[in-house]
Amino acid sequence: MLSAETIFSIPILAVGGAAAVHATAYIHGEARRHLPRFWCFFAFTLASMAAVVFADGKLPFLLAWEAMGLASTGLVAFESKEKSVRKATWIYLLACHAGACALMLAGVLMNRPDAAIAAFACAVVGFGLKIGFPPFHAWLPEAHPAAPAPASAIMSGAMIPLGFFGFLKFFPVVGMEPSNAAIYGWTFLAFGAIGSVGGILFALPQANLKRLLAFSSVENMGVVAMGLGLSAMFSSCGKNEPLAALCLAGTLVHILNHAFLKGSLFLAAGSVLRQTGTLDQDRLGGLMRRMPFTGTLFAVNAFGLAGLPPLNGFLGELAIYIGAFSAIKTGNPILVAAGFLVAVSLSVTGGLAIAAYAKAIGCTFLGEPRSKAAEDAVETPRRMWMAQLFLTSLSLAMIPGTLLFVHGMTGGFATGILVVAAVLGMSFAAITVSLLLIRRFVCPRGAKKPRLPVWDCGYDRPTARMAYTATAFTQPLVDLFRPMLRTRRHVLPFKGDPASPSDAAIATETDDLALGGLWRPVFTKSARLFQRVHLLQNGSLHLYILIILMAVLALLVFALVS
């Protein structure tokens, strides 16, 4: 059985290597002048991540953790000339330092046996800021669109799961008291359910492709948290070791799936940005014909991350599903509640994820181009899509690897169900590929047929503007969840001839509730308070002497009374 260090080091090597190859072609033009700075921070980030995994002891771990945050901040700030990048860098730096402070306090409290829960609470804040637990995820949708695509790939695919490595290293469920394990489990189940559903829900209305993928990372870390929490719940109830091992195995498999698939998706987003100059899905479209390798790999990885068979993302979530239904089957009220929460959250998350990735694929790569940049796009250099292909191949190779890994961790428990699911999925994929090959080679397309106008409500000359944009594609779902999303809609009605819809437009804005509704007001009010306190530093010397005398008198009175 693979150790935790081995499992968490695989994404660092695989995603880091693929991102490095992709970056050799991604960074071009004016940014090439800053290549030494980029590669310095890139190498420092990978080295500090490896140090986090292999650090022995609390102090080396904390030093490596802080170094990882500082190095990755340099990657986020690579294009620092833009105001949005500087803002995202500041938010990310605050999150890194706040997490490090919480982990320092957790390390101190871990030395006291009576402060185990307090230490765990501090660890939830410290590691949760890196993982992206709501409401600590505010840096994710800000930093990923600002950072270069190779940096986003390693940060999302390999860095944020290291928070779970910290939990497994310093708060192992094995040997934990049942009451503490229950607190551990419910904490992860709560954060996981909110993160998985909320993350993909906020991914739906995003027009920026990398921002959509960032919220998707919040969703996938929520799935991981639910698997880990369910494993802890089984351990707290005792006599459920195979089920606890199954949920833990599904959790670790999903971490690897997310690393390979999300790393490839971020690299694909970088390829789109490099070739079109934009990540706005409302201005893209038609890229599948112009960038066939990038588009095909993006679609395959998106299907896998949405949990659709036959890809390995489905098998990882299936193991957690089996654990959830097994928990319901036990009849234990606590396990029934936990299993029901996981099953419902995974189902809702899966449906919304399919909608989000269908939007990303359809509005970015299918249809007709909706801008000149998308129309003029061409395929990227070979090494860029080869880096994506490498990560996709690793995910496909994990299909038999998942079966062996789960079998080894559980002793064969529920392996048969996973084998049947894998065989059925691969059979479906083989049939689909065979039909496509028959369509391609046995039934080739005939002569080009003339394009004739169709009945289209009076518009006899269809254009790309009449197709669904990314905003319009998910608008029904966004309207359904508007009370939660608080989406603002801006409508520009028709002004001229109804036969020319060029004057009509609709735009929506969906801000992150954690940033706009919690952290920004908190920091704004704190800044106002500190500004008032700051006046004491610019006062009169006589006032300072008076305050000192009053404090001395108060201390004397207190001493006499006591």
Image (cartoon, grey):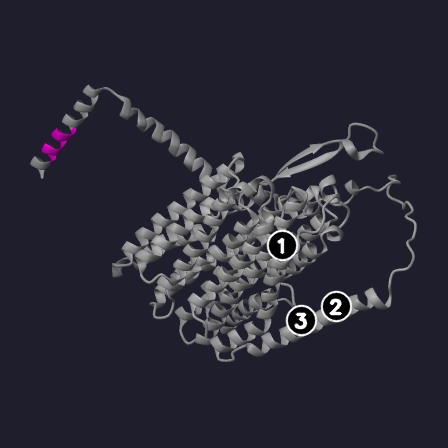
Q: Pointer 2: what residue?
A: 433
Up-down relation of residue 325 to residue 486 (above or below): below
Q: Quadrant of the N terminus?
A: bottom left
Q: N-terminal of the two: label 2 or label 1?
A: 1
Query: Residue 67's spot in the image, x, y percent?
Result: 38, 50
Q: Tell me which corner region of the image, top left, top right, bottom left or bottom right, holds residue 525.
A: top left
Region rendered in magenta: 551-558
Query: Residue 277's spot in the image, x, y percent?
Result: 65, 41
Q: Nearer the viewer, mark 3 or mark 2?
A: 2
Residue 68 placement, left or right of 471 = left
Q: Given the image, on which type of amino acid does mark 1 rest?
A: Met
Which element is circle 1 on?
helix
Query: Residue 345's spot in the image, x, y percent?
Result: 55, 59
Q: Nearer the viewer, mark 1 or mark 3?
A: 1
Q: Pointer 3: what residue?
A: 425
Q: Is residue 557 magenta?
A: yes
Q: N-terminal of the two: label 1 or label 3?
A: 1
